[in-house]
């Protein structure tokens, strides 16, 4: 199939729900991807934060191949050594006490589980989420997602999920009732514009949850696995959640969702109350287990912290040079620049010049490079952004 045939088939046969870029990607290695014409791109999207280890990491490829040749499917109604290995590794990574895991297949599913779990454990129905939040698009997760354009067409949504403004303790406290089960929050809002919370806010949210006997659910689907320069973003604020939602990069590129909870909370779910056919499949578990080992052996969390600092310094230099940059923000390798204009054209120009970047809303450029990114690759990306912003400022 040639490029045009692929465009035509996907455009004609696939649900028209993705804002597609005119690129057919066929190969990836580390931070680089290639299109069908053989053109090379620096991938500063990591497939929306999935390819944190870089594309087609050899240890992931090996783990998938080996497991696929032994056993591809194994329902969680049976036992499997790769699943057991992964569960042990996950419990090792998470803070003490967070030691029961539900495996699923996506970020939204990890949030679905958290919402059901909070209701089942507490016997209460209300969940407090935040304006600007993104938690996915299945009905429960969507009900906690803020953006009206995603929610409105599908109402009525799951009841008793309300939103309060971020960084506002007063409004949060006023929203709590005797029927509130949990507070659900992204430590750094990703899709909502890469927004780091105000100083002390997350610690205060933890305290309010403790005082009111509410569960704190942290959605770390985008911020975990070293992305912010710590294994979990909550480490920056020295808090721990009662329920933790993980997904995106955890299986080295394969679909996974992970909900981790304290034992007494997860134990409130009884047999049959929350299951999924594919959850905890052996190939995904083998890949996730290999991904965790690679993250640790290659010191990628440390790399994200070091190279994140370098990257942010370079972005700050651009801010001093170009008035159209309003703000630089983020942590580790989860970074963004807010512009005083739309970013769609800039993203297209980046792609033309061999750099893939994401938006986060209309006027924010978001950078989620693989954690294996080098200083040299950051310099290359900065040079592309510099040249585009130069054109934009003068044009
Ligand atoms: C914080 C957060 N939660 C949940 C999701 C939903 O994940 P998925 O698209 O895998 O369902 C996302 C996806 O971007 C996310 O960033």
Image: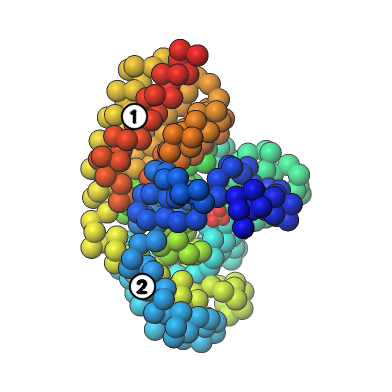
Pick out the residue farthest to the top: 394
Front residue of 332/201: it is 332
> What is the secondary structure assignment of the residue under circle 1?
helix
Give residue 289's position: percent from left, percent from top.
36, 70
Taking the spot 32% from the left edge, 17% from the top edge, the residue there is: 320
Give residue 130's position: percent from left, percent from top.
55, 41
Q: Is residue 125 above or below residue 376?
A: below
Taking the spot 42% from the left edge, 73% from the top edge, the residue there is: 64
Taking the spot 54% from the left edge, 61% from the top edge, the residue there is: 106
Inspect this view and state whether residue 381 appears.
yes
Q: Which residue is mark 1?
A: 383
Residue 62: mark in rendering: 2
Q: Is residue 392 left or right of residue 303?
A: right
Q: Quadrant of the N terminus?
A: bottom right
Residue 356: mark in rendering: none
Inspect this view and state whether residue 45 appears.
no
Query: Residues under labels 1 and 2: Cα distance?
Result: 35 Å
Give residue 60's position: percent from left, percent from top.
37, 67
Q: Residues within 10 Å of mark 2 (few under 14, many from 20)?
A: some
> What is the secondary structure assignment of the residue under circle 2?
helix
Front residue of 229/34: it is 34
- Which image quarter: residue 91? bottom left
């Amino acid at each position: 199939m040639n490029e045009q045939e692929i465009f035509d088939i996907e455009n004609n046969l696939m649900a028209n729900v993705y804002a597609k870029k005119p690129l057919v990607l066929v190969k990836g290695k580390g931070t680089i991807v290639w299109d069908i014409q053989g053109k090379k791109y620096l991938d500063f999207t990591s497939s929306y934060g999935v390819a944190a280890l870089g594309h087609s990491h050899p240890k992931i490829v090996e783990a998938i191949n080996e497991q696929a040749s032994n056993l591809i499917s194994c329902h969680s109604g049976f036992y499997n050594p790769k699943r057991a290995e992964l569960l042990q590794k996950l419990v090792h990574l998470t803070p003490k006490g967070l030691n029961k895991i539900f495996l699923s297949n996506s970020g939204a599913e990890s949030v679905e589980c958290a919402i059901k779990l909070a209701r089942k454990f507490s016997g209460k129905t209300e969940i407090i989420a935040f304006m600007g939040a993104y938690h996915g698009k299945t009905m429960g997760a969507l009900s906690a997602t803020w953006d009206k354009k995603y929610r409105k067409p599908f109402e009525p949504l799951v009841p008793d999920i309300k939103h309060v403004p971020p960084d506002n303790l007063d409004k949060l406290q006023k929203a709590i009732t005797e029927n509130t089960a949990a507070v659900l929050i992204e430590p750094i809002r990703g899709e909502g514009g890469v927004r780091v919370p105000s100083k002390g806010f997350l610690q205060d949210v933890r305290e309010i949850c403790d005082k009111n006997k509410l569960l704190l659910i942290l959605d770390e689907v985008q911020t975990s696995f070293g992305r912010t320069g710590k294994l979990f973003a909550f480490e920056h604020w020295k808090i721990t959640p009662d329920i933790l939602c993980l997904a995106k990069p955890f299986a080295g590129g394969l679909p996974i969702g992970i909900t981790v909870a304290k034992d007494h909370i997860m134990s409130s779910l009884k047999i049959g109350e929350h299951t999924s056919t594919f959850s905890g499949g052996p190939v995904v578990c083998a890949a996730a287990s290999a991904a965790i080992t690679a993250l640790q052996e290659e010191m990628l969390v440390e790399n994200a912290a070091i190279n994140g600092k370098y990257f942010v310094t370079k972005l700050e230099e651009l801010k001093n040079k170009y008035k159209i940059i309003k703000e630089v923000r983020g942590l580790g390798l989860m970074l963004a620049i807010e512009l005083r204009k739309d970013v769609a054209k800039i993203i297209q120009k980046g792609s033309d010049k061999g750099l893939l970047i994401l938006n986060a809303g209309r006027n924010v450029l978001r950078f989620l490079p693989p954690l294996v990114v080098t200083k040299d690759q950051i310099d290359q990306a900065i040079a592309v952004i510099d040249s585009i912003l130069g054109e934009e400022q003068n044009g």
